[in-house]
Image (cartoon, helix red, strand yellow):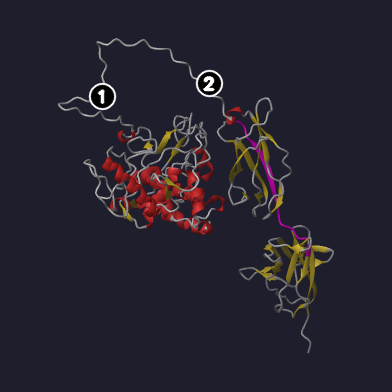
Amino acid sequence: MAAHFGRRLRKGAATTAVAAAAVAALSASQAPGVTTDDHGRQTTGAESTPDANSDDTATGNSRYYTDLPPLDSPSPSPTTSTPTVTGDAEAGIPATVLDAYKKAEASLRESKPGCNLPWQLLAAIGKVESGQARGGRVDASGTTYSPILGPVLDGNGFANISDTDNGAYDGDSTHDRAVGPMQFIPSTWDWAGRDGNGDGKKDPNNIYDAALAAGHYLCRFNHDMSVQSQMNASILSYNNSTAYLNTVLSWLEYYRKGTHEVPDGTGTLPSHNSDETTGANPSPSPTPPATSRPSPEPSTPKPGGGSTSPSPDPSTPSAPSTPSTPPSPTPPTPTETVDHLEDADTGKLTATAGDTFAEKIAVRTETEAGQAVAKVRVRFTIVGDDTDATFTGGETVATIVTNSAGTATAPALVAGEKTGDFTVRATVVGRVMAGLDYTATVTPRQADTLTRTSDTELTCVPGGEFADQAEVKATYKGAVAGKVAATATLIKSADDATENDKGPYFKDADGKTVRTLTDLTTDANGLLKLPKLYADDTTGTFLLRINTTGGATLTIELKVAAATS
């Protein structure tokens, strides 16, 4: 049987030797980017120390499974206990869960091809976070039969994260808990959640939604998973622990060597957690299974029965108790001293569609007395679905730590193609308090000049069609004006811009006469080529007028005359 690690090893020289050899073998064969020091400890370069009060990670640095995959070469395990499941069984992934990972990879391949996200990375994180949705206990749509919840993040061994969702996701209106098969905390799911199964909902307990959200979370900031350092950074942003990173990388390499599909509900369950708790975790709500509760260490049996656990001797009087010294009050964290947010001289937020905003949003965290507070996390969120604007890097959320002056400056905003106003909201991470809303405006692309690309005269015989098509080029302040909206109208005269009722015309898709074209747009090079023109039986000189956003206007003459003999 392959040696299985992540479990408590029995004491003894033989076991210690096996453990040291196994860790070294695993480091060499299964964890890319992982090295081993002289004492058999795994590292990935610089150590990463978890921030116990941070909710900037996907999971809030919640607990995770520490079981490691089997080694490549099976070897006997020096134990007399019941053998653990290893080998091919560990490579099995429940069918629906596996499908969700592969669909998420396919979606990211289209939306963020530069990320190069392998589905095996999602599988590795899913294994470590929830044991593949507790062995694939999901319905046909991918939703877990009961919610999967991590421990209460009340600062007792984990981050201290006050409630951010009024218990909507985790059922806890006092503190947050990681939720679902990929273990997102509510404040992260609020912006990172995705609809992976197309049912119109973003449910953290649905493996399709959670897997797609995890993929986007890992790929943010233009991280490329084919670059080991960038993959490591993404994994650490999920749970800021070097041990977590090594565990995920081990499962990633294991799954890359081959997996197979198993029926839902039959996947193997891990046994140990990062907080040394025995049993399956995260636990479903509302009542965790017995296997998720901590088990006391068993006492050592004595010959003939009983145990070596010490018991009080009733004949020995108890020593008088000594009054304990009350603990010193814990000083407040910088975040806890923040009373409000103030604007830090943010200018007017206006940009043309497709351009980067010249101004950046800046806020200052202050105490009630108006003193600046440094080292506080401020989250900037683009609110609503009525815009396609993003921050630099393509994300809609950015978390910045305030500097020594208490100021946090958001990354530059990049306007999308949707014009109009949108909102950016600044909030303090880890504090329930009013945020600041900023209105940003995206104006249409403009052109101030239109010119024809050809001097050829546009002529036609009555009842015929023009041999040449009108083409124009738009510029703005001398530069090419691409993607500028335009209209083209056959007008009555230079002084009367109303639509003509005779003379040349365009045709619509049904072949009907049209003398006004809307929804025209110049291409990336500022060029606009109009559809073919036709002539009725009326002869004479007619006018075609083209207008663009920004005020550019060009009038072109069209001549309809009988052919000369």
* Residue 125 in sight in this render: no
Dot 2 or dot 1, earlier in sequence = 1
**Would you place residue 468 above or below residue 37 in this image?**
below
Judging by the rendered image, the residue that carries numbered circle 1 is 309
Q: What stretch is highlighted in magenta?
A: 433-449
**Would you place residue 321 above or below residue 182 in this image?**
above
Q: Does the magenta stretch include residue 437?
A: yes
Residue at image point 71% right, 71% down:
505
Which of the two residues, 122 or 451, is positioned nearer the viewer here?
122
Q: Is residue 103 left or right of residue 509?
A: left
Residue 128 occupies quadrant: top left
- How far across and how far down the image is residue 473, in percent? 74, 68
- How far across and how far down the image is residue 500, in percent? 76, 67
* Residue type beneath disc 2: Pro
* Residue type beneath disc 1: Ser
**Element on which disc 1 rests:** loop
**Element on which disc 2 rests:** loop
- How far across and how far down the image is residue 539, in percent? 78, 77
Mark nearest the camera among 2 and 1 is 1
Residue at image point 75% right, 63% down:
479
Q: Does the magenta stretch include residue 537?
A: no
Mark 2 crowd level (few <14, some 14–19, many ≥20, 10 Å Cα): few
